[in-house]
Image (spheres, grey):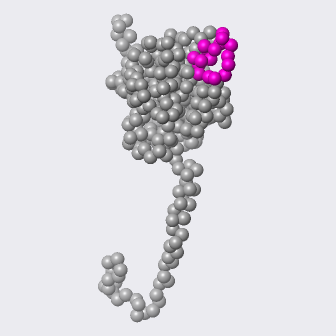
Amino acid sequence: MDRVDTYLSLAERPNTQRSYAAAIRHFEIEWRGLLPATPESIARYLAEYAASLSINTLRARLAGLSHWHSAHGFVDPTRSPLVAQVLKGIRAAHNVPEKQARPLELLQLQQVCTWLNQAADEPRVATDARVHRLRLARDQAMLLIGFWRGFRADELSRITIENTTVESGKGLLFFLPQTKGDRTFAGRSYRCPALSRLCPVAAYEHWIAVSGLTEGPVFRRIDRWGTLAGAGLSPGSIAPWLRALLAAAGVDAPEQYSSHSLRRGFAGWARVSGWDLQELMEYVGWRDVGSAMRYLDGAGHDLNARFEAGLSSGKAAAPQAFPPPSTSPKDSPRPGKKLPGALRVVK
């Protein structure tokens, strides 16, 4: 039975397991709810946190509660009409724009990489020179691979040396056994090209050479003595790492960025570089247009420029006013007479 339990636990992704566990803790410990729950208690729970939690968070809580009841053989109270109506009312009363991370644009990427290169040239005491060199090499590789591959935090943290193929001067090929939305655990390969500048391939090769790693996770924690952790970085540590890096490099408002900023930044760069939506979805790994559009900014500041460009191109042509309608009896159409556009006046 131990093997059965092991495989059952592996059938769900770690992020999903953590989300379900957080939902149960919140319901039982913070709200002090009882399990198994009733539709009425679920409805009161939702109403209690309607104003303080986003609709997406409430849905995640319901998913965890639903999973608990199904796994333990109880009727799922989250599927009752009462809960559905309460959730609908909450959405109507507290409908606000979804908060999105600020995209990391190419100029900021260049700014951070310039700072990293300058920091590498700074003289250091021998005792911490190795630690300094390790962190700078790791940070540059993480930043460039995360941006140019449009990786999520969990994808970036699960890259392994065994599943990475390097073609020096040409590109990288990553294989991830598990990806978001991959219900059959088929895994997926991700290619990343070598570039003339801000090159992720060169940054990866430099990090592997400096760290001396030969197997296991590519990106790991580095302690104050320069010792690399055996496990990879947790997905939750990527956002604090990025904010700290941006702050050190002097990027404005680093608190507005998150791990999604790398993905959104690449999507924005690809859009203005002429990529069509289909090839962007295929490269990043989005399965539906809705997922892609959440990461793509709208016209934004370009909206005014587009309108003005249209106005400028039409300056030579004077606006045509519609001629006033004729009131002369002789100009009035006879019944049944054809008018321009094959319209007929019906008597």
Residue ranking furthest to the bottom: 330
Quarter of the image containing the C terminus?
Answer: bottom left
Q: Is residue 99 shown above or below 303?
A: above
Q: Which of 308 and 236 lies nearest the eye of the viewer?
A: 308
Q: Is residue 8 shown above or below 154?
A: above
The spot of residue 88 in percent (x, y) is 50, 39
Q: Which of 150 and 38 lies nearest the eye of the viewer?
A: 150
Residue ID at (37%, 15%): 8
Residue ID at (43%, 17%): 161
Reply yes or no: does residue 127 show up in magenta: yes
Residue ID at (55%, 21%): 137
- The answer to whether residue 139 shows anywhere in this view is yes
The spot of residue 6 in percent (x, y) is 38, 10
Residue ID at (52%, 14%): 211
Q: Which of 119 and 321 lies nearest the eye of the viewer?
A: 119
Determine which quarter of the picture holds residue 123: top right
The spot of residue 110 in percent (x, y) is 58, 35
- The answer to whether residue 18 shows anywhere in this view is no
Highlighted magenta segment, given as a residue range: 120-136
Quarter of the image containing the N terminus?
Answer: top left
Determine which quarter of the picture holds residue 224: top right
Residue ranking furthest to the top: 2
What main secondary structure does the magenta stretch of the protein show? helix
